[in-house]
Image: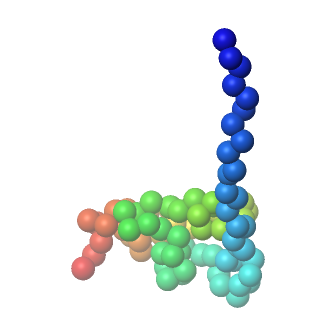
């Protein structure tokens, strides 16, 4: 049998996006600030992950808590069909 050498596939590294909240300390990460929080939610209502949003670990944890609080207080819809028109 022939032994295959490990494939030398070049993998693309995604550029590190700067954290939105670290760059803009004046932007409050709060459940009442729906305009800022809604940037980090998909059209289906899912929370966007760190890799795609570029937030740091500390702000991603706080963002998740803020989104869940805003949903519980019905400031944000759970899904698109629950949106108030």
Residue ID at (37%, 63%): 44
Q: Which sits in the foreground, 3 or 57?
A: 3
List x then y, in percent, for residue 63: 60, 66
Q: Residue furthest front?
A: 2
Give the vertical position of 9 relative to 66 (above or below): above
- As drawn, is 34 to the left or to the right of 82? right
Instruction: Identify the residue shown where x is 73% and y is 29%.
Output: 5
Q: Residue 31: image x %, image y %?
A: 54, 73
- Quadrant position of residue 81: bottom left
Location of the C terminus by quadrant is: bottom left
Whether residue 32 appears in this view of the structure is no
User: What x and y, as percent, mark residue 58?
Assistant: 73, 63
Residue at position x 50%, y 61% in the image = 47
Q: List the single residue furthest toward the bottom.
A: 26
Image colouring: rainbow
The picture places residue 45, in percent across and down from the top left corner, at 40, 63
Question: How many labels sit on residues?
Answer: 0
Residue 81 appearing in the image: yes
Picture quarter with the N terminus: top right
Q: Nearer the viewer, residue 29 or 12?
A: 12
> Residue lying furthest top in this view?
1
Q: Is residue 71 above or below residue 27?
A: above
């Amino acid at each position: 049998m022939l032994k295959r050498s490990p494939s030398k596939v070049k993998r693309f590294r995604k550029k590190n996006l700067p954290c939105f909240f670290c760059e803009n300390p004046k932007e409050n990460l709060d459940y009442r600030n729906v305009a800022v929080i809604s940037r980090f939610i998909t059209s289906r209502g899912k929370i966007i992950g760190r890799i795609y949003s570029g937030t740091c670990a500390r702000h991603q944890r706080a963002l998740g808590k803020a989104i869940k609080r805003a949903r519980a207080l019905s400031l944000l819809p759970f899904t698109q069909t629950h949106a108030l028109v």
